[in-house]
Image: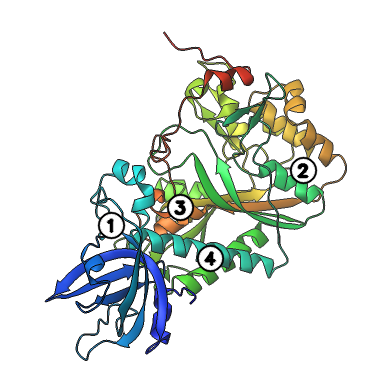
Amino acid sequence: MEKISNIKTTEYIGKQVKICGWVQTKRSHGKIIFIDLRDKSSLVQIVFTPSSNIYKLAQKLRPEWVLKIQGVVNKRPKGMENPKLETGKIEIQARNLEVLFQAKTLPFSIDTNGYEISEEKRLKYRYLDLRRPRLKKNLEIRQKVIQFMRNFLIERDFIEIETPLLTKSTPEGSRDFIVPSRLYPGKFYALPQSPQQYKQMLIVAGFEKYFQIARCLRDEDMRGNRQAEHTQLDIEMAFVSREEILELIEKLYIGLVKKIFPEKKITKIPFIRMTHKEAMKKYKSDKPDLRKNKKDPDELAFAFITDFPMFKWHENPSAGASTELSRMSSGQGKWGAEHHPFTMPQTEDIKKIKKEPKNILALQDDFVLNGQEIGGGGIRNTNLDVLTAVFEVCGHKKAEIKKNFKNYFEAFSYGVPPHGGIAPGIDRFLAIVLNEPNIREVIAFPKTGDNRDLMMDVPSEVTNEQLKELHIKIVKKK
C-alpha cells in the first residue's frame, strides 16, 4: 500500500490508507486515545480503541514521535467535526502502528508563533523552529513568489542562467568574503557580492534578457535586518531604457501581489516616482514610507526613487564598509560610488566628472516598499573612458583599474550593447509583505545579526593541517 499525504485522506472514506508523520498532540476521552498526526500537508485525527492489538503501544506515544500508521478512513460522528481542520470531517481508525522514532522532549513549544522565544534559542534549534506552522507557511509562500517571478520572466523571453560562486575580489562595494586557493598558494577567490560583472558578460555574449535567483554574499558589519548572504532576483537586459526596466518591475509586482497576496492593497498604480532630491527634501529619506495609513498591515506603498547622486563623500574611509574605500588612505575624506561604479553617470563629460563629482547624477534607481529599499538598478556604463574616470574619482590609479578589471575592459572592446538591469531583494520583500519583524523569519537557515550560524556553530576554527595545506598562518592579536 502506497503512503499518501494527510490531506489526501479525505478522498478515501471507507478505505484503508497508510500515512506517516509526527505526533502533534495526544489526548484521551475515556479509554479511547486520539492523536493528531502531522505531516507537511495537514493534521489528521487518529483513533485507537482498547480492543485494538496496538492499544498498549498507542498509550506510550508522546509528542513529536515519528509514526507510520495504517487504518480505515471514517467520517467523524455528527457534531464532532472540526471546521478549523482541512481533514476535520474525517478520522482514521488505526489498525497498524509502527514507531519510526521516539523523539526527546523539545527545548521549546512549536505550537505558538515563536516570537516569545529568544532568537538565539530558535536559531540554535532551527530544524525544530521550522516545524512551526508560521515558518512553514512563510517558506511555502517564498517558493510561490520565486515561482511566479520565474514564470513571469520566462514568458517574456528571459533566460535563467547561474553564475559562479567562486570569483575575483574587486573593489566595487561591500567587503568580500575571500576563499584561499589550495592549488595556487597565496591566491584567493571571492564570493560574489552580486553577479554584476558576470551578468554584464552575458550581455556581451548576446544573451539579451537574463535573470537569476541569485545568492549574494557580503562581509558587512553587524546590522539587525541584514544577512551575510541574501537572495535577490537579478535581471539584466540589452538595448533597454530606464523606463522599460521600471515598467517591467511594476508589472511583475502588481501581478505578484494580485496572485499571491490578494488581501493586500497597493497604495498607487502606477507606482509612485520621485527623484532622490525630491525624496530627501520632502521626507528626509531616500526610502520614504508612502503609505496612506501606516497602521494598515495590508497596504503596500511601492515607489521608484530616481536620479541618485553618482558619488558619495566619506569622511573616514578607513572605517567604512566599502572595500574600495578601505583601500584608500586613512584619515582623509574620499569619494566613493553611491551605489556601484558600473552605473552610467548622466554625463559623459570626463572633465566635469573629475572636477565636480558632487554634482554628477547617475542613471540609478531604487525600488522602495513601505519605507525600506527592496531593490536597486539602472543603466550600465559601457563607455570605458567614463568608467575609468569614475574609478579615478573613487581614488584608484589607472594601472590598478586596468589590473582589477582587465576582463571587463577586454570583453567590452569586442562590442557591447547598451544595457541595464535591476535586482529586487526577495528576503526583504517577503518580510514586509508577510508583516514579519525581520528577514530572518523568511529565510530557512539565517544567521544572527552578528553573522553567526548557531545551528552549525560557525564561524569556527579549522585544523592546523587545513591551514598548512592552504599556506595560511593565523596571527593572533596581542
Question: Label 1 to label 4, Cα distance in Å?
Answer: 33 Å
What quarter of the picture does the C terminus occupy?
top left
Which residue is under mark 1? 110
- For badge 3, the amino acid type reads Arg
Q: Which residue is under mark 4?
A: 253
Label 2 crowd (10 A; few <14 / some 14-19 / many >=20) = many
Check contact, mark 3 vs mark 2: CB within 8 A: no
| Front-lying residue, 60 or 477 | 60
How far apart are labels 4 and 2 at the CA level? 29 Å
Residue positioned 51% across, 20% down in the render:
318
Closest to the camera, between mark 4 and mark 2, is: 4
| Mark nearer the viewer, 2 or 1 | 1
Residue placed under numbered mark 2 in the picture: 382
- Name the N-terminal-most of marks 3 and 1: 1
Amino acid type for the residue under numbered disc 1? Ile
Q: Is residue 343 visible?
A: no
Q: Residue at x 42, y 86 (%)?
A: 11
Q: Give neighbour class at mark 4: few <14, some 14-19, many 20+ (Cα, 10 Å).
A: some
- Image position of 74 (left or right of 440): left
Instruction: Say what secondary structure mark 4 lies in.
Output: helix
